[in-house]
Image (cartoon, coloured by chain):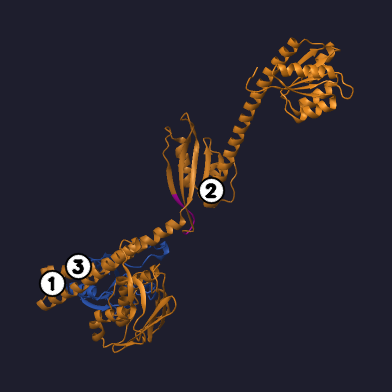
Chain colours: A orange, B blue
Amino acid sequence: MDTEKIPRVLVVDDEKGLRVGTGRLLEMEGFSVKTAENGTEGILLGTREDFDLAIIDMKMPDIDGIEVLRKIRKSKPNTVCFIATAYASYETAIEATRIGAFGYIPKPFSPEELIQQLNKGYSQRLLLLESEKLKKEREENLLELAGEKSRLNAIINAIISGVIVVNKTGEIVYFNHAAIKNLNLDELNIGDRYEEKMPQKVNDLIEEIISSEIKTQKSLAIQIEIIKPNELIAEIICTPVLHPDGSFAGVVLVIRNITEMKKIEIIKSQFISMVAHELKTPVAAVQGFLNILIDDRFNIGYEKQKEYLSRSVVRLSSLLDLVNDLLDISRMETKSKKREIEKLNVPEIIDNCIITLELEIKKKSIRIIRNTLQQECNLFADSNEITRVFTNLLSNAIKYNKDKGSISINIEENKNFIIARIEDTGIGMKPEEKDKLFQEFFRAKNENTRGISGTGLGLTIVRRIIESYHGKMEVESTYGIGTAFTIYLPKSYK
Amino acid sequence: MALIAIIDDDPDIIEASTLVLQSKGYDTVSASNPTDGFKKIMELQPQLIILDVMMEEPDDGFFLAQKLRRNKITTPILMYTSVSKTIGFEYAAGEMVPVDDFVEKPISPDELLNKVENLLKKK
């Protein structure tokens, strides 16, 4: 007998002597006993508590033992029940076992006989409990498995990449919502043939994997323009799925929407193409002169030689400016240059810029008008960057000004911003020129801008610096009248 | 000798090209933008047009070439190209530019003179 746990026995008998006697006997043998004096009480106790064993008298005045047995078995199927009766008959014995009694104890019984029967019953009870436990564990495992499956489904359906699984016979056996979206399909159903749903180029890849002799885990990828032009571009990666034994199961397709990435790529390659053009232009001019200078056939006079060389020097120095501007932009993009944030006084910075530009200002006889009343307008920023902003803006205001024109400078501040306005009396811009103002390499070209040099990156740099400080810039311009730039720079650095 | 028109927004390219062409005895006329170029071509009727692609769309070299052809000017056009028009920007088939030959910058004097000679001979 199990010494760890005390077996609990229910005795249901209307005969008090037997009930009490059996109870005492069993308690002495180490059982814990509860008794019921009739069928009703027996059902009540037996269905409410989970007894290990129950001894039920067959004949009771209210409800007979068979009925009590049936009720207890129904509610507690693992309670091992015995039917005890003085009217033992073959039929009742069969009936009792049919309903689920474990044993049949004819009355009167000897203590040894009873204990032996109960011990047998208790072993049965332990077996039942053990198998119940195993069954429960198995069920829990299955539940877990089902949960895992639905969790995986939820995850695969939630990811932005499309997933399609094609089995080795070419049927689509799994897909998620993103697959339909990223391939712009009307619908997709389990069991569809892949070749009827996928773009031809994808079919070729799947076909290649399915038909190849040696199945490795190697993926095949392709980029396809699903909606032209550049509206939806997808990257499709096809990978063979192998069973654990290495045999071929099918192909899994991962479909990514790479439209935005592609658009950036296009912008980048256009930028590179533009940079190449801008770099090549001065190189071509210089090489044009050098080709002539080096070639004796052209027999160029000394004065012309000097002229071509000095024109070449001008082109090379503008090429150098361009390379420096490009490097500045690249440093800004990669943030590779460390900022030194300090307290700056904007009127002072502008004064310094004017000093460096003095030569150009004198050449065109331009008048500088300072409207600033305050001597101090402070902000926290990198001195080089803010100097660059004002140098570029003032240099434009000089270059695109009329001879004997003027530049008005106005600096104000409000609670959060320093507001600087630089207004020239220059050639101004046509509306279509103004729209392109911040495009890299855009330079207004018309009868008034001939002879004005520049890299076409000045305002790009200004804009990028201002935006990096979370500031903003406004432009007003009237063709033939002048242009005004207003910049807002936050006073504090975040 | 033949009159050749050079239309390019880069004065240094005009200068060098002019010198090379004049060394072979050609007469030249130049313009630094498509508008002036069109005027001078209509007025002086050159035997050959050298036209830079020029980037300022829509008023670029291609645009001028098409405008000339629309105006029944059949003069051979030699186009100076740079990189941007050949890389990255693609033209639809029907939009092919009506020029006769291309010279890529930087320009080699020999290549320029050869192409000019060939185009004038064809004419």
Mark 3, secondary structure of its residue: helix
Q: Which dot marks residue A179?
A: 2
Chain bearing mark 2: A
Give, as a three-letter code, the residue at label 2. Ala
Residue A93 image position (x, y, % from top left): 81, 14
The residue identified by callout 1 is A298
Mark 2, secondary structure of its residue: helix
Give, as a three-letter code, the residue at label 3. Gln
Please tell me whether residue A228 belongs to the stretch shown in magenta. yes
- In this picture, which residue range is highlighted in magenta? A223-229
Q: Where, quadrant-wise, is the N terminus of chain A in this rendering?
A: top right
> Earlier along the polypeptide chain: callout 2 or callout 1?
2
Chain bearing mark 1: A
Check if mark 2 and mark 1 are on a common chain. yes
The residue identified by callout 3 is A287
> Is residue A389 visible from the viewing direction of this image?
no
Residue A301 image position (x, y, % from top left): 10, 76
Label 3 vs label 2: CA separation?
54 Å
Q: Give the residue at x 63% y 31%.
A: A139
Label 2 vs label 1: CA separation?
68 Å
Check if mark 3 and mark 2 are on a common chain. yes
Q: Which dot marks residue B109?
A: none
**Vertical placement of A379 versus A364: above or below?**
above
Give, as a three-letter code, the residue at label 1. Phe
Residue B76 image position (x, y, % from top left): 30, 70
Crowdedness of circle 2 by 10 Å Cα count: few (<14), some, many (20+)? many
Q: Nearer the viewer, mark 3 or mark 2?
A: 2
Please tell me whether residue A169 belongs to the stretch shown in magenta. no
Mark 1, secondary structure of its residue: helix
Q: Nearer the viewer, mark 2 or mark 1?
A: 2
